[in-house]
Amino acid sequence: MRTHVALQLLCYWLALACWSAQAQAQARHTLEQLWITPDLPTPESVLYVPHKKNPYLFVALIDGQGDAVDGKGGIATLTPDGEVLDKNWFTGLNAPKGMAIHENRLYVADITELVVIDIKKRALIKKIPVPGAVFLNDVTANSSGVVFVSDTRTNKVHRIEQDEVSVHLENIASANGLKVFGSNLIVGAGPELLLVGADKKPLTLAKGFAQGIDGVEMIKRGEFIVSCWAGLVYYVYGDGKIELLIDSQAQKINTADIGFDASTKRVFVPNFFKNTVTAYQLK
């Protein structure tokens, strides 16, 4: 009798393990390459713009060193299919990186300043100096127009509201990728993905990334696509598990600050030193 029960339990656990393995296999995600756009000088960041009639992409082009005040940087525009609309949509920046949009304003991190651009007029509105900044990196904005910008070298996240700058977070190691989530802030901090609420106490959502996080995009509540500049792209599940989708380190193909179109589930990856942007279909 005991042997029979033991066999039943063994069969049950085997069946459960098989079902779990199948479920994990079905849940596995992949990125299928769609197109590559060449001749974009040092693309660092891509931002998808969901325009009603004609959506497009903003691409931040450093065109030089990542911390050089040389006026060579700018913003290009692409179609979601990779066609270059205007390689010089906006020029005269230094080393533009992360971008965010609120209403008609494009916010761009540019070394020690937050640049504000009128999108319709394609004109500079203002440059907001960030006191103590060294290497501003990613930008995100909430529905009220409050902007957050990370400084990777000072381990801080700054908050800009009505042009007033304050330190929102300190001691966030290698703070980079940002994404507003309701009243919370998602932060890529070195090899960890953090959730920071109103209490400003970081909660680790996922860890174990092989390199420091660069770009962060939310796929759905609790799940993310995360890039690491060195050439890695991961899928992050709600339980904190991470899945490697791209590893192009051996080919020295960088995967910098990614963009994402939620309607088509396309991921747009700036390849930095390769001077290309690559689009993938998330499956």
Image (cartoon, grey):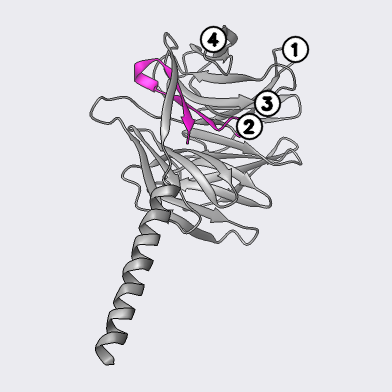
Mark toward the start of the polypeptide (1 vs 4): 4
Q: CA distance from mark 3 to mark 4?
A: 16 Å
Q: Which residue is drawn at the image coordinates 50% and 33% (left, top)?
A: 137
Q: Which residue is drawn at the image coordinates 57% and 55% (left, top)?
A: 196
Image coordinates for residue 156, horizontal then vertical, percent: 51, 46
Q: Which residue is drawn at the image coordinates 35% and 47% (left, top)?
A: 209
Q: CA distance from mark 1 to mark 4?
A: 22 Å
- Are the residues flagged by discs 1 and 3 in contact, CB closer than 8 Å? no
Three-letter code for the amino acid on which mark 3 is drawn: Pro
Region in magenta = 262-283
- Are the residues flagged by discs 3 and 2 in contact, CB closer than 8 Å? yes
Furthest residue in direction bottom, as rendered: 1
Vertical order, 216 against 72 (above or below): below
Badge 2 is on which residue? Answer: 263
Mark toward the start of the polypeptide (3 vs 2): 3
Q: CA distance from mark 1 to mark 3?
A: 18 Å
Q: Nearer the viewer, mark 1 or mark 3?
A: 3
Q: Along the line of sight, which residue is nearer the eye, 282 or 276?
A: 282
Mark toward the start of the polypeptide (1 vs 3): 3
Can residue 170 be seen by looking at this rendering?
yes
Q: Nearer the viewer, mark 3 or mark 2?
A: 2
Please give the count of numbered marks on the rendered protein.
4
Badge 3 is on which residue? Answer: 50
Q: Nearer the viewer, mark 4 or mark 2?
A: 2
